[in-house]
Structures are given as C-alpha cells and as structure tokens.
Image: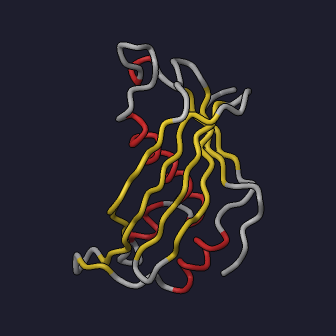
Amino acid sequence: MTEQTDQPFRFRFRVRYGECDAQSVVFNARYADYVDISVNEYIRTLFGDYQALLDQDLDIQVVSLTVNYRAPARFDDVLEARIRVGRLGNTSFTLHLEFVRFGDEQRVAEADITYVLIQPSEMAKTPIPAHIREKLEVGAPGVLISHAGE
C-alpha cells in the first residue's frame, strides 16, 4: 500500500441556517449530509467525476456510517472535512473524516463511512480493481476544495 502524506484531502463548506436545530447548532442528522457532500468531492478529485465510475459499471453503496460529535458547529461556521482512507478490503473500503472549524481548528465531529463496491448491471458486490485500489491508497494528499467563500 502506498503511504499517504500527513496532509489529507480537505473540503471546506459553510453551515447554512436551515441546517441548525432549535439549540442553534448543526442538527445531528446533517452530518450524514456533510459526509456525503465531502466524499463526493473526494471521489470527484480521485476519479474525475462520479460518472467515471459508473462508466466502468462500478458504483459504491454505503454499508456503515458512524459519527462521533466533539463540539457544536453553528450557522455560518466554515467547516473543513479532512478525509483519509482507512481500511481497504477486497470489495469494501472505509474513509475516515474529521470535521474541524476553519479558523480555530476546533474538532467538531469525526465519521467513518464504509462502502462496498458494486457492479450495477448485476447489483452485486465486486472486487476493487487494481486501478481503483491504487487511487484510494494514494488518496488526494494536500488537495483543498472550498465551497465556503472564505
């Protein structure tokens, strides 16, 4: 396995008003959305776009998502998702995400998401091909994508 550098892939976004709950903090269920949009940016960075996977008769399905909350995030905070590859199995892989508040580096949440690679034409899991495995192993160290306008 190729070793990733210390610098993970980073994706910045701004907390929107509608994502907050009655306590004026990000509603817990929104973190699943945050994981999804962050991973989509990661996949786009690794493979060009999501369609590039689909064109190979490959897709990913979530089989597990765990989130641990560390500190509140509030409306208009800029969060930075930092993504590293975790476990790479035969047909599945896990990504580890750390969400930090941009500016003060306060860790607000961590998440682990596990995907299984499938072949959509068969709706069955399939081994991770070598060229996909290699891109996951290398990751996207040092890449920063920002939608926050900071």
Q: Position of residue 16 (x, y in %)?
A: 47, 22
- The quadrant of the rendering that contains the C terminus is top right
* Res 120 quadrant in image: bottom left
Residue found at x 62% / y 36%: 107
Residue situated in front as seen by the camera: 90 or 10: 90
Residue situated in front as seen by the camera: 28 or 7: 28
How many discs mark residues in the rendered view?
Answer: 0
Against 107, residue 54 (above or below) is: below
Against 103, residue 87 (above or below) is: below
Residue situated in front as seen by the camera: 14 or 27: 27
Against 139, residue 145 (above or below) is: above
Q: Position of residue 36 (x, y in %)?
A: 43, 48
Q: Is residue 88 left or right of residue 61?
A: right
- The quadrant of the rendering that contains the N terminus is bottom right
Q: Is residue 7 left or right of residue 99?
A: right
Colour convention of the picture = secondary structure
Against 22, residue 68 (above or below) is: below
Q: Position of residue 105 (x, y in %)?
A: 71, 33
Residue found at x 39% / y 34%: 30
Q: Position of residue 110 (x, y in %)?
A: 53, 45
* Res 134 quadrant in image: bottom right
Q: Is residue 10 left or right of residue 121?
A: right
Residue found at x 48% / y 65%: 94
